[in-house]
């Protein structure tokens, strides 16, 4: 499957009240165009989707927070894997769409092909890890996405995907609009003082 | 010296419920009290940009946090500020130890960053002030208000001894 196909499949499985953080580049564009709205679409801050997801999961313990990240973003902010494993928020889920390249900038290779993601994540202290390493496994992917939402506790799902070639339009919300629409759409209110 | 317990009580009153940071010896006392605090959770970040990311996510979820780092960490957060915290309009307080001043003559690793710290913050368009012990509540309050009113990160430079 391609990353965009996984995201489309995911959109059929979501309940609708989840909070999603997507990594910069193609993944955020796909999340913006293929999922319900509004979510946190990162436009920059490469390497930070997991940290943003961690912060969001800590302030929204009653809601499911799902980070969708490319492998390049995941590897740039690899330290956040260990921070998340340590605090292990019950409501946080991480999905890594691993195409082994920086697709957004032209498909230059990352070092992902030599990583054993299951060992990496389990060694960091994450208990619930699934790593799907064969590319043509739509059934497996669907099953794992369903389980990711249903099963309790912090979970990480690594999926090897084919490189995308679909071209999606840019996100037409300015980042300040993303923040406002997210707060409004998810009914997030602030304490005064 | 600003009493760390009073300081954390003040932050709690201002609705800060999370602190994220990478240590500097200037914050030793404060970090000890933070670890003890049952009201403010402390997350030790692996890098300073991760700390900015966590603080941003916390605000997306409607809560306020502050970040603690050494000024060397300013060198790690350029993109986290300009393409996330500033761009998405996220108020946050960043406490930065001011290393590389006279008392750090034996620490050449801090000398260049010490020299450029204020220029760096100015060129990144981050409002800042050097926190003085006298009247700290008032200067803090002014900066917090600015951060919230303008939806932007602001920075407090902390000299040696200010937090004990
Ligand atoms: C700090 C930083 N360095 C480089 C870039 C340029 N850049 C934008 S997206 C991207 C690739 C992201 O790769 P990945 O997360 O694997 O997603 P993919 O593009 O493969 O979907 C890069 C290198 C950037 N935006 N920020």
Image (cartoon, rainbow, N blue to C red):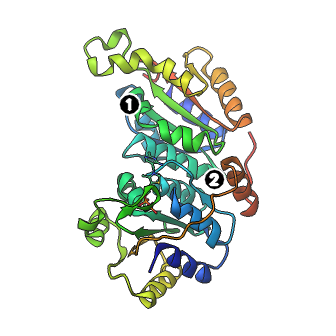
The residue that disc 1 covers is B28
Marks 2 & 1 on one chain: yes
Determine which quarter of the picture holds residue A70: bottom left
Q: Quadrant of ligand 1?
A: bottom left
N-term-proximal mark, 2 vs 1 = 1
Name the side, left or right, on which B33 lies relative to A32.
left
Residue B110 to residue B105: above or below:
below
Residue B62 drawn at (x, y percent): 67, 52
Protein chain holding label 1: B
The residue that disc 2 covers is B60
Q: Is residue A123 visible?
A: yes
Q: B44 or B72: nearer the eye?
A: B72
Residue A167 to residue A159: above or below:
above
Q: CA distance from mark 2 to mark 1?
A: 29 Å
Residues at marks 2 and 1 touching, judged by CB atoms closer than 8 Å: no
Which residue is rendered at x = 46% and y = 40% of the image? B34
What secondary structure is marked by label 2? helix
What secondary structure is marked by label 1? helix
Residue B16 drawn at (x, y percent): 61, 42
């Amino acid at each position: 499957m391609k990353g965009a196909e996984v995201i489309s499949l995911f959109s059929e499985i979501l309940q609708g009240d989840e909070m999603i953080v997507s990594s910069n580049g193609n993944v955020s564009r796909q999340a913006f165009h293929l999922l319900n709205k509004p979510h946190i679409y990162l436009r920059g801050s490469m390497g930070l989707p997991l940290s943003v997801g961690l912060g969001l999961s800590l302030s929204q313990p009653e809601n499911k927070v799902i980070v969708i990240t490319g492998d390049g973003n995941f590897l740039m902010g690899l330290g956040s894997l260990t921070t998340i494993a340590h605090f292990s928020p019950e409501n946080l889920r991480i999905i890594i769409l691993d195409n082994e390249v920086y697709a957004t900038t032209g498909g230059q290779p990352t070092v992902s092909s030599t990583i054993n993601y299951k060992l990496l994540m389990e060694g960091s202290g994450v208990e619930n890890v699934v790593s799907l390493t064969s590319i043509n496994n739509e059934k497996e992917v669907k099953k794992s996405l369903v389980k990711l939402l249903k099963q309790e506790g912090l979970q990480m799902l690594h999926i090897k995907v084919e490189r995308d070639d679909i071209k999606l339009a840019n996100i037409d919300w300015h980042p300040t609009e993303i923040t406002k629409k997210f707060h409004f759409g998810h009914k997030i209110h602030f304490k005064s003082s | 010296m600003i009493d760390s317990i009073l300081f954390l009580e003040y932050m709690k009153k201002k609705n800060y419920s999370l602190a994220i940071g990478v240590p500097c010896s200037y914050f030793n006392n404060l970090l000890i009290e933070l670890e003890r605090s049952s009201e403010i959770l402390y997350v030790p970040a692996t890098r300073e940009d991760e700390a900015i990311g966590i603080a941003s996510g916390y605000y997306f979820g409607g809560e306020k946090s502050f970040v603690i780092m050494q000024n060397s960490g300013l060198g790690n957060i350029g993109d986290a500020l300009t393409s996330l915290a500033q761009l998405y309009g996220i108020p946050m307080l960043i406490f930065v130890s001011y290393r590389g001043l006279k008392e750090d003559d034996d620490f050449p690793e801090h000398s260049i960053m010490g020299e450029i710290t204020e220029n760096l913050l100015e060129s990144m368009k981050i409002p800042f002030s050097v926190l003085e012990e006298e009247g700290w509540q008032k200067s803090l309050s002014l900066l917090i208000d600015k951060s919230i009113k303008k939806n932007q990160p602001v920075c407090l430079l902390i000299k040696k001894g200010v937090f004990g």
